[in-house]
């Protein structure tokens, strides 16, 4: 009797390929060498609320990972699941305290700096810069980001720990909201963010074909 084939993976991401959380899971899968199917959900059209996806994803959000008969949403939960079932190529530090610090950084980036995320959505990275200046709240959030990033990356470090981890990509995305918009970022942090984006999996994500933004359309066609 032959052994059962391993369960397949499918990753659902936003059709615009701008979600930093979908990017985090995408990079994790690529770094671990896990084969997966990639499917998109058009958030602008509300496809995440339609029954097909809503029945699949408990939280009706991307990213959502399907592994055989198991589905999981929320990027941090997905990455931790993948780290547990496929530990041979880790994306977190081996040291327990460093691993906890990496997860702290990820949790902070997902829960704080809302004004910066509002002023500088990831569209400035994947579609083009914004003409609007930072609001006072956005400037305060950017200043906080820079201060904390400098404390995490002293003396020009190019990774949070001795080896790369997935939290480096998450932090780089937040910094690149400013870098890609030509906002003021200390050179060492800008270089750190640039180097993180040179990883092949990130470059693959950047190269995805994206639908035009509504503001780039004229009579429904690309301007």
Image (tube, rainbow, N blue to C red):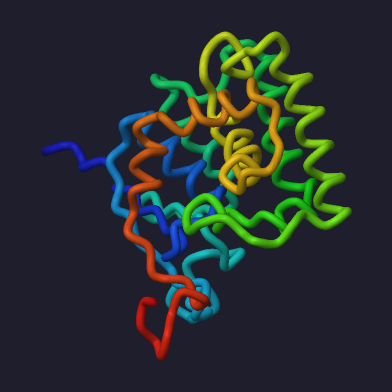
| Residue 16 % position (x, y) | 44, 63
Going by the image, does 115 lie left or right of 67? right
Res. 54 in view: no
Residue 178: horizontal and vertical position, in percent?
Answer: 65, 43
Viewer-nearest residue: 93 or 124: 124
Q: Decide if residue 92 is on the left or right side of residue 27.
A: right
Q: Can you say whether 77 is above or below 120 in the image? A: above
In the foreground, 95 or 114? 114
Res 109 visible:
yes
* View extreme (left): residue: 1
Please tell me how many numbered marks the rendered image carries: 0
Q: Quadrant of the C terminus?
A: bottom left
Residue at x 30% of width, y 47% of height: 36
Residue at 78 percent of width and 47 percent of height: 113
In the image, residue 171 lies at what x, y percent? 63, 34
Q: Which image quadrant: the N terminus?
A: top left
Q: Which residue is pictured at 39% across the width and 53% down the height?
A: 11
Give the side of residue 173 with respect to residue 85, left or right: right
Which residue is at a point 59% across and 51% down the rendered structure image? 74
- Work out whether residue 184 or residue 43 is closer to the camera in this orientation and state it: 184
Compared across the picture, whether 54 is left or right of 205 comes to right
* Residue 170, quarter of picture: top right
Query: Residue 212 location, x and y as percent?
Result: 41, 71
Above or below residue 100? Residue 156 is above
The quadrant where residue 158 appears: top right
Q: Nearer the viewer, residue 54 or 138?
A: 138
């Amino acid at each position: 009797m032959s052994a059962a084939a391993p369960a397949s993976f499918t990753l659902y991401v936003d059709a615009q390929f701008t979600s930093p959380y979908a990017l985090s899971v995408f990079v994790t899968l690529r770094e671990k060498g896990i084969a997966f199917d990639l499917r998109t959900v058009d958030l602008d059209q509300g496809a995440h609320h339609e029954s097909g996806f809503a029945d699949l994803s408990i939280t009706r959000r991307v990213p959502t990972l399907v592994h055989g008969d198991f589905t999981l949403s929320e990027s941090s939960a997905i990455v931790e699941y993948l780290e547990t079932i496929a530990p041979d190529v880790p994306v977190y530090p081996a040291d327990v305290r460093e691993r906890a610090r990496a997860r702290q950084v990820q949790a902070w980036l997902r829960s704080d700096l809302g004004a910066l995320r509002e002023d500088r959505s990831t569209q400035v990275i994947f579609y083009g810069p914004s003409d609007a200046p930072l609001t006072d709240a956005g400037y305060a959030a950017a200043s906080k980001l820079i201060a904390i990033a400098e404390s995490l990356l002293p003396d020009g470090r190019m990774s949070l720990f001795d080896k790369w981890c997935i939290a480096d990509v998450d932090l780089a995305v937040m910094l690149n909201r400013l870098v890609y918009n030509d906002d003021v970022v200390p050179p060492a942090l800008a270089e750190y963010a640039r180097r993180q984006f040179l990883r092949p999996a990130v470059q693959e994500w950047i190269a995805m074909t994206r639908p035009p933004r509504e503001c780039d359309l004229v009579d429904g066609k690309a301007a």
